[in-house]
Amino acid sequence: MPRNQYAEICDFTGPFLGSHAVSQGDLTRAQLRSGPYNRLFQNVYVPRGLPLDHELRCKAAILIAPEGAVLTGCSAATVRGFPFALENDPVEFVVPERQGFHSLRGTHLRRTRLLGEDFEPWRDGRIATPLRMTLDILADTRLRRSFPRVVGQLDALLHAGCIDRETLEAYLGNRHDHGIGRARQALAFSDGRAESIPESEVRVWLRLRDIEAEPQVEVYRGTLFLGRLDLAILKAKLAIEYDGAWHLLGEQPRLDARRRALIEAEGWEFIVITKEELYADPRGMVDRVRAALNRRK
């Protein structure tokens, strides 16, 4: 595994190889074990005090990744500014299909076909391009991310302009990767107008049960703007909104109540979805929306 500056220079401001620090005389084995360092992976350490987030784990894992491995999926997205991975989620790599490798604790390695345009240099290794990264987010079922969740992540990438819908459709069109059908279905369900992943998840759960809701609908009284709805079923004048934790902070509850009262005065009904309902009982959430639709027929 040829390595360059990040593996060879032990400046102790980021991840470093413990074996290299010892062989160069920068640290003794005792200092490595008992000094102010955290071990993130076998033989990879970081100074204590650094924020132990997923991006740091990616920088550490790339030092010991197999030859030719490409950082991808939610790990690559996190490095690119989309915090899809939690701190202790496995660091995701794809490895050329003919490349042998040993599993690494704390990582998720998947053998696949890689083309030259699928990756670019990053630190001591490679990172997937936004298109390849997106393919792996959508297609990798081994990590057991729900279909609504990956559509929500795709929505976020589209909304931010990280990827272009038509370019992604062309990229997926001629591929035969494992999971490509799921990736294409996710693209068909996606909508770059969505402004949060949970909002997207609610929309996808509804669509999977044949309820179509449009994101980010603006409501007016004549020319007076009353507010914007997370999701709306226009014919029924039914608004569906996700209230995350920030909706309970400061002035937000009062502002939400005022906006909803103005819109309700125009004949709309609101269904407010909580985090607990979305993630603990999505079927119950859908049933509640369907019951409201039936009432408003």
Image (cartoon, helix red, strand yellow):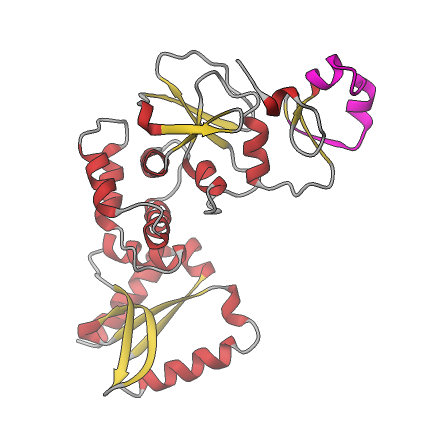
Q: For this view, does 288 lie left or right of residue 72?
A: left
Q: In this view, does 24 lie above or below 196?
A: above
Q: Is residue 232 above or below residue 145?
A: below
Q: For this view, does 109 lie left or right of residue 205?
A: right
Q: Is residue 71 above or below residue 84?
A: above
Residue 195 drawn at (x, y percent): 37, 60
Q: Which residue is drawn at 46% across and 60% down?
A: 275
Is residue 282 or residue 7 the one in the foreground? 7
Determine if the magenta segment contains residue 217.
no
Does residue 267 appear in this view?
A: no
Q: Check the picture and name the quadrant holding the C terminus.
A: bottom left
Residue 186 drawn at (x, y percent): 26, 44
Q: Residue at x 17, y 73 (%)?
A: 235
Residue 32 drawn at (x, y percent): 77, 23
Is residue 48 or residue 206 the one in the foreground? 48
Q: Which residue is drawn at 31% across and 88% down?
A: 265
Q: In this view, does 252 lie above or below 279?
A: below
- Give, as a single range, the part of the protein colored magenta: 19-40
Snapshot quadrant of residue 263 = bottom left
Snapshot quadrant of residue 143 = top left
Does residue 161 appear in this view?
A: yes
Q: For this view, does 272 lie left or right of residue 218?
A: right
